[in-house]
Image (cartoon, rainbow, N blue to C red):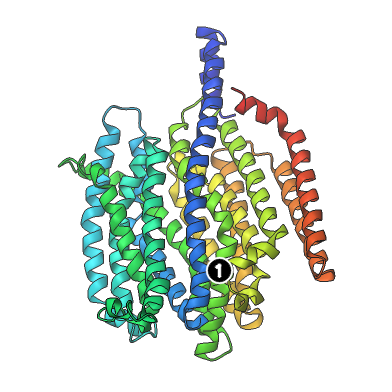
Amino acid sequence: MQAGERRRIIGEWRKNGNNTVKLRCNCARMSIRKLAKETAIYGVSSIVGRMLYFLLTPIYTRVLPNPGEYGIATDLFAFTALLMVFFTYRMETAYFRFGSEADEGSAEKSFNTALWSIVGSSLVFGAILFLLSDWLADLFQYPDKASLVRMCALILTLDALCEIPYARLRLESRPIRFAAIRLISIGVNLGLNLFFLLICPWLQTTSWGAGLVSGWYDPHFSVGYIFVSNVVASLVALLLLSPIFFRLQWQFDRALWRRMALYAAPLVIVGFSYVINETLDRKIMIWFLPGTSDENQAQLGIYGANYKLAMLISLFTQAFRYGAEPFFFKQKNTLGVQKLYADVARFFLIAGMAAFLFIVLYIDAVKYFIGPDYWVGLGVVPILTLANVFLGMYYNFSVWYKVTDKTRWGAYISIGGALITIGLNIWWIPIFGYYGSAWTTLICYATMALACYFTGKRFYDVPYDLKTMALYLAVGIVIWQGSDWLRVQFPEALIIRLALNTVVLAGLAYWVFIRERSRIRNYFKF
C-alpha cells in the first residue's frame, strides 16, 4: 500500500469511523460486478460476432481458388491493422484518461477535442492512402490488386471515424448499444460475403439467375468481394453511430489536445508494436520461407486460417478490454484500488486459462471451422492460444503506466517486444516455418507481461499473487501436454479422449472454485 493511500485511509477512519471505508469497499465490489456484467455483454457480442466471422473461414478456405488467395486477404488485412494505429493514434485511450476526470465538463470537452482531431486526420490519411494505392500494390507484389488497397483506405477511414463514438459508449457504460451496433455491422459483412461468394456463383449456374448477375458480378474478383463487404459493413456502423456525431460541438481545446497527444504518443508506439507482433510474421513468411512465391503464399494461408482458431480466446480478451479500459480509469482514485486491480487480473487469468484449455482439449472438434487442407497447421493453435493468455495478462499489468501517466514505459516495453518479434521471426521462420512464428509470438507476449509486471512494482505496486497465477498457468500447460500426448498415441480413440478431457476440465474447475470461493463470494454476492 502506498503512503498517499495509507494517509487517506487513516484520515477517513478518524473522521467517520469505519463506515466510509466499508462503503468504499462495497463500491469496489459493486464496480467489479459491473465490470463482469459489462464484460459478459461485450463478450456475448464478441463471441456471436466472431462466430459469424468464423462461419466465413470455412467458406474462404473452400470457395477461394487456392490458399494463396486467402493469403492475399490475410496480408492486406494485416496491413490495414497496422495503419489503423496511425489513423486513430490511440486518441480513444486519451479520451478515457481525460474524459474520466472529476471536474465538470471534462467528458464533453475531451470528446469534442478527440473527435474533431480524428475526423480531420482520418480524411487526410485516407486520401493519401487512396492516391498511393497503385504504388502500394506494386510494393506488396500485387500489381493487379490496387483496387483492394483503395478499399483498405476506405475501411480505415470509416473505422477510424467510428472509434471515438464507440469509446463514448464504453465510457458511458452503454455496452448493449455498443454490442448491437457491432453485431449489425458484422451481420452486414457476413451477409454480403455469403451473397457474393455463395449465392452469386450459384445464380450463375441457373438459367434464370445468370441474367441477374451477368452484368455486374465478376467471379474472378472473388477475393475482392471480401473487401467490398467490409467497406459496406464499416459504412453501416458509421451510420448507426451518427446520432453520437450530432452531439459533437464546435469545440476544440488546443491545450487539452496537446495534453491528450502527449499522453497518447507513447501508446501509438505500443499499438504499433502490438500490430508488428500480430502481423509482421505474415510478411516475413513471404520473404523468408524457403519455397517459391506461390508456395510461401500457401503456407501463409494455412497459418492464417489456424491463427483464426487460436484467436477464439481473443473474444474474451477483447471483451475484457472493452470493459476494463474505462473501468481502470474510473476506479483509479478508489480506496484500495491496487487490490482491486490485482483481483481483476487473477479472475482474468482463471477465465483465460479456461478458454485456453477448452480450445486445446477439444481441438478435434474446433478444427472443423477450417477446411481439411489447412489441418496440417493445427499444431500452432495451442501455442498461439497460450500467447493470447499472456497478452491478456499484459493488458492487466499495463494498468499502472496508464493511470499514472507514465505511458512512455509502455512504449519501452512494446519496443522490446517488437524487437523480439522481428529478431526471432527472421531467425526461426527459415528453420521452423510458421511454427517459428508461433513460438515467437508466445515468447514475445510472455516477456512483455513479465516486464510490465516487474516494472510496475517499482512505480505503482499492485499486489498480484504471482505464485498462485503461475500455479494456474503451470497446471493448464501440464493438462495441455497430457492431452496432446494422448492425441498422438491414441488418434482413433476420439470419443474416449474427449470424454476424459471433459472429466479433467470439470475436475480442474472444481479445484479452482474451492481455492477461490471466498474471493468469488466477496465480489459476486448480491
Q: Quadrant of the C terminus?
A: top right
Q: Nearer the viewer, residue 42 or 318?
A: 42
Q: Nearer the viewer, residue 512 or 56?
A: 56
Quadrant housing residue 426: bottom right
Label total for image: 1
Task: Give amino acid for label 1.
Answer: Thr
Residue 335, compared with residue 466, is above or below; it is above
Residue 14, compared with residue 291, is above or below; it is above
From the image, tell me which residue sits under label 1: 421
Residue 219 appears in the rendering: yes
Residue 322 drawn at (x, y percent): 45, 45
User: Is 102 placed left or right of 359 in the picture?
Assistant: left
Mark 1 secondary-structure assignment = helix
Q: Residue furthest front?
A: 208
User: Is 212 placed left or right of 521 in the picture?
Assistant: left
Residue 502 drawn at (x, y percent): 76, 51
Residue 417 drawn at (x, y percent): 54, 62
Q: Nearer the viewer, residue 415 or 503?
A: 503
